[in-house]
Each structure stands twice: as C-alpha cells, then as structure tokens.
Image: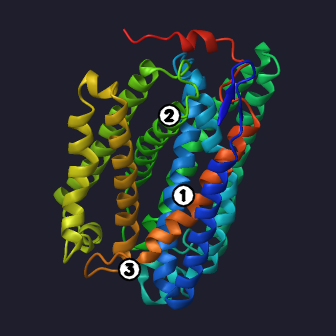
Amino acid sequence: MQLDRKTYYLTNDENAGKAWLWVGIIGILLSAGGFILNPERSLQSYLVAFVFWTSLGLGALFFTMLHHLSGAVWSVVVRRISETVMANLPFMAIFFLPVLFGFNTLFEWAHHDSGAAHELLAQKSPFLNVPFFIIRAAAYFLIWSMLVYFLYRTSTNQDDGHEESHSRRFRKVSAPGMILFAFTCTFAAIDWMMSLDPNWYSTIIGVYFFSGSISAVLPLIILISLYLRRQSILTEEITLEHYHDLAKLTFAFNILWSYMAFSQYFLIWYGNIPEETAWYHHRWGGSWTPVSLFLPFAHFVVPFFVLMSRAAKRSTKLLVFISLWLLMTHWIDMSWLVLPNFARDGAIYSWTDLTCTLGIGGIFLFLFWRRLTVHPVVPVGDPRLQESIEFINI
C-alpha cells in the first residue's frame, strides 16, 4: 500500500479490502447455517450485530456534523475517515431486511393477539404496530441517507477545488441534520431495542444509545488512523496531536455514556415502579449478573483511568488497546440491551453472535475501504487542511 502525496490517493491497496470481504462472506455463510439450525437464536444475534454496526455509522455521522458546526480545525485531517464510515449507513438498510423477516420472532408486540392479551400493549398499539414500525424505519434510513449523500458529495466536490458555497452547504445540512439526527437516533433506539420489552420504557434510552455510539466510533477512527500509520500512510498528516484530541473526545463521551447509564439506573431504582424495575431484574439474575457488573467496570472505570493522563492519550500502543477494549465493551453493551429480553434466566452467548458480527462487519469494512480508496484519504480541497496538519495541542 502506498500514498501519492500529491493527490493523497491510496495505491496498491487490493489486499486489505479483499480480506474484509472474505471475512464478511464467510461470516454471512456461517450465520446462514445458524439460521437453519436455530433461527430464533440467530435472529437475536443478528439484531445485536445490526445495531452495533449501525451505531458506528451513526456515531460517524454525528462526528462529521459536529466538525462542520463547530468549525474545528484539528479534525480536518480525520474528516474523510469519519465521512467514509458514515457513508455505510445507506447500506445498513439492506442489512435491516432480515430483522423485518424475523419480525414476529423478535418483537412480542408484533403478535396479532398481544394487544388483546395485554391492556398496556393495546394502549401502545397506535405506535407499536407493524405498518408504522416499517414506515418509521424507512424514514430513519431515508433521513440518514440524505444527510450522508449531501455531506459526502459536498466533501468530494470540494476535492476538485474549494468554493465558499461548500462551507455554507456543510453548515446548512449539518444544522438541521443535528435535529433530525437527535429524533431519528432516539426513535431508532426505542423501536429496535426498547420495544423488545414492550412493557418497559425509558426517557434516557435515546441519549444512552447515542453516547455509546460516539464513544465507540472515535476508537474506530483511531484504529483506522493507526493502521494507516503502520503502513506509513498519513504519518506526517495525522500526528500525536490529533490522536491526543481524539482520545480526549473519547474520554469525554465515555463519561457521558456512563452518566446516562447511571442516571437511567438510579431513577428507576429510586422510583421503584414495577413496570420499570422489571427490565433491570431481567439483567440481574443467573449469569447476567456478572455481565451487568462487568459493564460499568469495563465501559467506565477502565477507560476513565487509562485515558486520564496526557501521556496515555499520546501513546499509540495504549490507544490501540483502549480502542479495541471500548469497541468490545460497546458490543457487550448492545448485547446487554437486546439479549436479556429473550434469555432472562442467564447470559447464553452463541457462536452466531460472532459470525453475525463478523458477517455484517466484514462487508461494512470492505465497503468502507473501497470508498476510502476511490477518493483522497484527506479532504485535499479544504482550505484549513494545512492548518490542521500543523495543529499543536496547547
């Protein structure tokens, strides 16, 4: 793999993309075998993998819009990476189709007799019904795809030569886009995870999902940048100064996730309302207990103390470790939100959890890599690029 420093195009890069494509194909084939052997458990694994990879695309979309609205300079050099990750969101609509096909298996409220059996479900039926669920899902992907299209297209057009209209368009899309993102991300979390237990509700679930998404995509950006650095790509453009700021943001959003997680638990514990406490009760029994205890330790305590110091934020080896750690704990968090709704006696992880995650993830990363090599790996038309390259933390 080589980098043309005049154009910032990658060359001789066939192996990385093909490797991820094979991982995706093999993962999907193995997952298909799982669907044949145990369709119910495989659907649960698939839903976990789907929300995990979708959350990374959403986190990248938020980071890109935040970059444009804040006018940040330091993040210009990593903007193309986040843009390329978010560009996979439209493809996640295809991966959503198995969730629709397994609708009755995953969602209790989708059963025709559930409304008659439970008075609460009958009251929620104007919102929790199959046609409206599909319409909402289509609206989420349509909005996300439109935001991705306008932001990514404007960015690649800027590569051919910067015009002031590009900067204005970035802000014009990102400003209302943030509002649309807040609504769609919140309702997607409600639809795809909270409604798995239709008797439970939380006003924090949307922010919980969002904060987990951004605190997971930042480590992904760090890992991609460090992989390129290991291949002697962008070694002079993405420096320790940029890794320092990425680590600071990871530290901050991870604390936000921790605050949301604690707030949700504390308010439900203090209120002690049976309709709310039952959700935590399902996650506090049998082998779910160590998972519930592990999450705050792994998702808060470890990253908090590891990333607290300045030296840690500037250590590439430590950043590789904590980035992989946070991606792992984010996956466990997504499984903790989904799986106890079906396995309430204890945590039972399956080999299909791995194959579904690798299947979707392999295709996700293949599409990312293919798109990254089509355009310059940094936004060469951005007038602040050189200033970003020379950025130094104070």
What residue would you read off at disc 3? Answer: 342
**Label 1, label 2: how far apart the Cα atoms are:** 37 Å
Chain-order first, disc 2 or disc 3: 2
Residue at 59%, 32% in the rendered image: 65
Camera-nearest residue between 234 and 156: 234
Q: Bin the neighbour count of mark 1 within 10 Å (Cα to Cα): few under 14, some 14-19, many 20 and up.
A: many
**Label 2, label 3: how far apart the Cα atoms are:** 42 Å
Instruction: State left or right for residue 81 relative to residue 281.
Output: right
Disc on res. 384: none
What residue would you read off at disc 1? Answer: 188
Mark nearer the viewer, 3 or 1? 3
Residue at 60%, 29% in the rendered image: 79
Camera-nearest residue between 9 and 89: 9
Residue at 19%, 75% in the rendered image: 285
Mark nearer the viewer, 1 or 2? 2
Q: Percent x, y for residue 89?
A: 64, 51
What residue would you read off at disc 2? Answer: 230
Instruction: State left or right for residue 134 relative to residue 354.
Output: right
Res. 192 visible in picture? no
Q: Percent x, y for residue 337?
A: 37, 64
Q: Are discs 2 and 3 less than 8 Å apart at CB?
A: no
Element type where label 3 sits in the image? loop
